[in-house]
Amino acid sequence: MTNKKEQFYLALQHIPAGFVVTYGDLAQLAGFPKAARLAGKILHDLPQDSVLPWHRVVNASGKISLPEGSPAYLQQVARLEAEGVHLSKGKLNLRKFRWHLACL
DNA sequence: AGCGTGACACGAC
DNA sequence: GGTCGTGCCACGC
C-alpha cells in the first residue's frame, strides 16, 4: 500500500483547470470517502510552490479555508482568478465551478 | 496508549 | 444564512 499522501497527490492532478473540488471530494477521489480532514492535513503540509494544483481545493461552503489575507490565501485567489474561477465576497459558486464526474 | 488538534463534511436544530 | 455534535484520519505530546 503506497502512502495515502501519494493517493491525494494523484487525485489532485485529475482536477482540470477552471474547476474546483471540496476537501471531501478530493478525499473521495483519492479513495478515502470520509477523510476530508486528512485532505486538509495533506494540503497544509504541501509547500506553496508545489507543482500540484492545491489551489483548486476549497471547503464545502465554497470558501478558502485559510486566514483571509494570508500569503497562501492571496496566492490561491490569484491562481483561481487566473483560471477563470472568480470569487465574490470571499467565496465562489460551487454549483458553477465544482468539478464532478458528470462534467466529462 | 490516551487525548487534543487540524486548510473538513454532514445532519439536526 | 448559523451553531452544535459526531465521524474521520494522521500527528504530536
Image: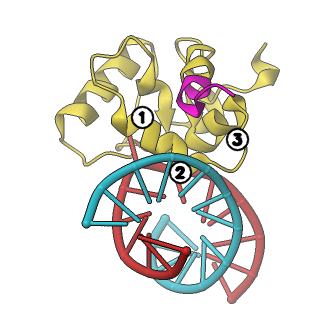
Chain colours: A yellow, B red, C cyan
Q: CA distance from mark 2 to mark 3?
A: 10 Å
Where is the C terminus of chain A found, in terms of image quarters? top right
Same chain under badges 1 and 3? The reply is yes
Residue A90 in sight here: yes
Please give the range of residues in magenta. Answer: A1-8
**Residue kind at label 1, given as amino acid type:** Leu
> Is A16 contained in the magenta span?
no
Determine the residue positioned at 32% across, 28% down.
A77
Residue A3 x %, y %: 58, 29
Horizontal arrangement in the rendering, residue B11 relative to residue C2 (left or right): right
The earlier-in-sequence mark between 1 and 2 is 2
Dot 1 corresponds to which residue?
A43
Chain identifier of the residue bearing label 3 in the image? A
Same chain under badges 1 and 2? The reply is yes
Tell me, for residue A83, which label it has, or none.
Answer: none
Q: CA distance from mark 1 to mark 2?
A: 10 Å
Mark 1 secondary-structure assignment: helix
Contact between marks 1 and 3 (CB within 8 A): the answer is no
Q: Residues within 10 Å of mark 1 (few under 14, many from 20)?
A: some
Q: Residues within 10 Å of mark 2 (few under 14, many from 20)?
A: few
Mark 2 secondary-structure assignment: helix
Chain identifier of the residue bearing label 1 in the image? A
Dot 3 corresponds to which residue?
A32
- A46 or A84: nearer the viewer: A46
Dot 2 corresponds to which residue?
A37
Determine the residue positioned at 48% across, 25% down.
A56
